[in-house]
Image (cartoon, coloured by chain):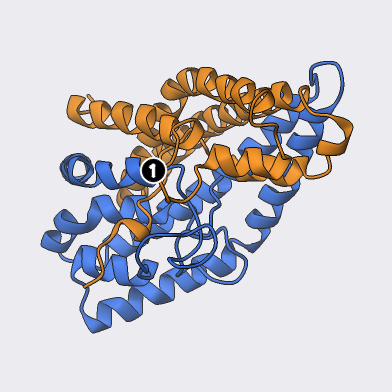
Amino acid sequence: MAITRSRLLIVAIALGLMTTATGAISAQGRRGGRGGQPGGGGPDVRSRMDLLTDAMSLTGDQKDAVKARMDAAHKAAAPIRADLDRTRAALAAAAAKAGGGSDIPAAADAYGDAATAMTELEMKTLAEILTLVTPEQKKQGTAPAFYLMRGAFLDDKKWNEIPKGRLY
Amino acid sequence: MFPKVLISVFVAATVLSAQGGGVAPPPSGGPQTLFEQFGHRLDLDRKTQFPEAEKFFTDASRVATPIAQQMQQLRVRLVNAEIDKNDVEIKAILPEYRTAAAHMADLEAQTFAKVYALLRPNQVNHATEAFAIVAGVFIPPPPPAARVPIR
């Protein structure tokens, strides 16, 4: 049962990726602010919640439930965000040291710990969201939701705007 | 075990995104690439430092491709394990992910160190901020809303 569900999810993600990969690919490297703002360019943008709603055709009740989980995860992410900032700065300092950066591996390990914690939170939250929707909704929206989770909780103030120009 | 099509998509997405994130010039009038933002933050000289730094990132993007693939695959496995509430699998995945993430961070830092070595004293003030800009530069991000047509 569990194996079947896992395979279904993987296949759904694979199929979804085939249709969303172009967007993801084109997106990379052009992270910026909202449309019309410095660093943004292009048309105006919709919120992460709007995109999740469209991707999965969420009902009103489902939207409320998804929002509640995203809010909770964003709050839980606060210490991880701080760890990412701290370890990233330490990694930059290690790289900047004269002599080739022998401190880099240890600093990279510390950053890897924080990145893993954030990834775990993102994927746990996605899994929770996927339990809220029907199989049809899951099939339709798993791939976009998978991508939309990456970096969702990096901003101190909100998870709903994408992107602010940061990943990890 | 892992569907070949999925791996293929990951490979394509990773390679192309790394190119877009690291080196590809923007279309006329478009927003800056991450690398351009990075170069601008460091005030890299367009004729001398910029091309050299760009080559460092291009070279690193090739090394990063299998790492990024692995990280994406592990994220998929992690979602499945979370859905199944398979704690054994989750505990097996997380150390793998941690190793891959540290490897990627190491690569980013080593690349940054090469660029840093090019800098003049008056260019290092914003080094930490510049390094933050290229966090995850070799990993495919979620599609930004800018790619979604407005209805």
Frontmost residue, A26 versus B26: B26
| Residue at 78% across, 22% down | B117
Q: For the C terminus of chain B, which image quadrant?
A: bottom left
- On the image, numbered disc 1 is attached to which residue? B27
Residue A88 lies, in percent from the top left, at: 70, 42
| Residue at 56% across, 52% down | A166
| Residue at 55% across, 33% down | B101
Depicted A99 relative to depicted B37: above or below: above
Chain displayed in blue:
A
Depicted A84 relative to depicted A55: above or below: above
Depicted B27 relative to depicted A59: above or below: above
> Color of chain B here?
orange
Residue B132 relative to residue B94: left or right: right
Q: Residues within 10 Å of mark 1 (few under 14, many from 20)?
A: few
Residue A50 lies, in percent from the top left, at: 31, 72
Residue B52 relative to residue A137: left or right: right
Residue A158 lies, in percent from the top left, at: 54, 71
Depicted A105 relative to depicted A157: above or below: above
Frontmost residue, A134 versus B11: B11
Residue A5 relative to residue A101: left or right: left
